[in-house]
Amino acid sequence: MATCRTPVPPRTSAYDLAVIGAGSAGFSAAITAAEQGASVALIGHGTIGGTCVNVGCVPSKTMIRAAEAVHGARAAARFPGLAGESQLEDWQRLIAAKDDLVATLRQKKYEDLLPEYSGIAYLNGEARIADAGVIVDGATVAAGNIIIATGSRPLVPSIAGIESVDFLTSTSLLELSELPRSLIVLGGGYVGAELAQMMARMGVAVTVLCRSRLLPQAEPEISEALCEIFRREGITVHCGIAYESCRQDGTGVTVAVSDGGTRTEITGDQLLLAAGRTPVTEALGLKEAGIAQDEYGAIVVDDRMRTSRPGVYAAGDVTGRDAFVYMAAYGARLAALNALNGDRLAYDNSAMPWVVFTDPQMAGAGLSEAAARAAGYEVKMSVLPLENVPRALAARDTRGLVKLVADAKTDRLLGGQILAPEGADSIQTLVMALKFGMTAKALGGMIFPYLTTVEGLKLAAQTFDKDIDKLSCCAG
């Protein structure tokens, strides 16, 4: 991968702000500060652009779309009179196209942006917090304030024998020169779920091992529905198991798990670790700098993005908070504005949307039923299977459901989740409803376009107090 070639000014310069990390959060902070007229030292280490463009969102989602294209042709038979077939012909060519897309976006959205901001100086090197600012490869960079945005990397769980296994991560999986015949996926969160389905649709025999359930952050009804969809596609899913040990030999990888006290060994050609991510902080000297971390190594910040050391802020995955690229950029922008303007802005994720790019897609915003109850609300729920949504019927694809949670006393919407083929593009309507404190009745009374997936939100809202089976197509 290419690294930034922007000329580096003398590192003894004093800056208003030093930003450690040149990914989405780092760039957001640096650009925000530069737009405020500040001088910024943006410090990267290795490939510019961070996780999202290089090894995360961009490469994974283009590969997921490719797998959807393969599956879509095969699924054409759901329409009477149609038949379709598709197959992967050249994995290496597909990987090369993915790499080309990554390189193009990294160049356009990161490297080429730097010359557009005269207030940003890019420094490439390993950074460490110091009394006078930041030490970069032995040289001191003086700065009035510091923002740490060093991101995260795949977590290697503590399992007996893991150190002797040549395992894959979400990064190396998308760099394989050839597909394995079978794959064990350790972890059923959003990374594991997305990549498991993608690989299965490419022709790999996939087994997913979940300590709790598939997508534990999802509502139980949605988790169960997606798990059944996976199994219908031929993916083996084991839920509620404990990882005991793993080993590798000439025949592949074996993972021993415990399921209700019964020990089982599961074998596959390769093992993908998708059990979470861990903050990248080792080189920063946080302990010496008096910067607090939580039990998982994440930097502790308050709602103003401040760390325990005055003048030092943190944002993005390194804080362990809301691990989505847009939230990293949002938090970093707040950190920059607060560092330069007096800590006036508070982080607000109350209406944060999130998406899992499985098929069907899963998306949510606001409180789940369990979270709402834990917060002390008296709640009411609406669960609408997709067979009640005209768009799904017309598309002959009723996989999924919509669940809304509302305050039983005030009817105010508290949150919701969607499992649907266009769920990702529908969730923002719920975000707006939550942002402006809408009631379920108000959402159900809005005008929605007919034969759209987002109309499912209207129907789910109406379901709180109506029998939608007694309504005509566009009634209500």
Image (cartoon, rainbow, N blue to C red):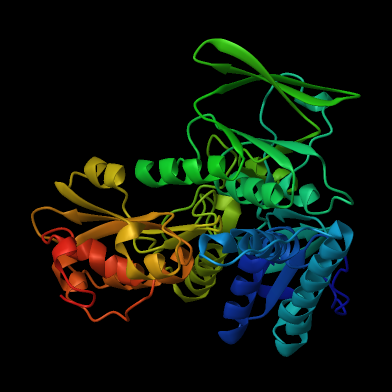
Question: In the picture, residue 396 is in which quadrant?
Answer: bottom left
Q: Is residue 54 above or below residue 442?
A: above
Residue sitting nearer the eye, 96 or 163: 96
**Is residue 113 shown to the viewer in this render?**
yes
Residue sitting nearer the eye, 268 or 347: 268
Count of numbered badges drawn on the protein:
0
Where is residue 428? Give x, y as percent: 39, 71
Residue 378 relative to residue 240: left or right: left
Residue farthest left in this picture? 409
Residue sitting nearer the eye, 267 or 21: 267
Instruction: Give the residue at x 55% y 67%.
Output: 81
Instruction: Give the residue at x 83% y 47%.
Output: 179
The quadrant the C terminus occupies is bottom left
Instruction: Give the residue at x 82% y 64%.
Output: 94
**Is residue 280 shown to the viewer in this render?**
no
Question: In the picture, residue 185 is in which quadrant?
Answer: top right
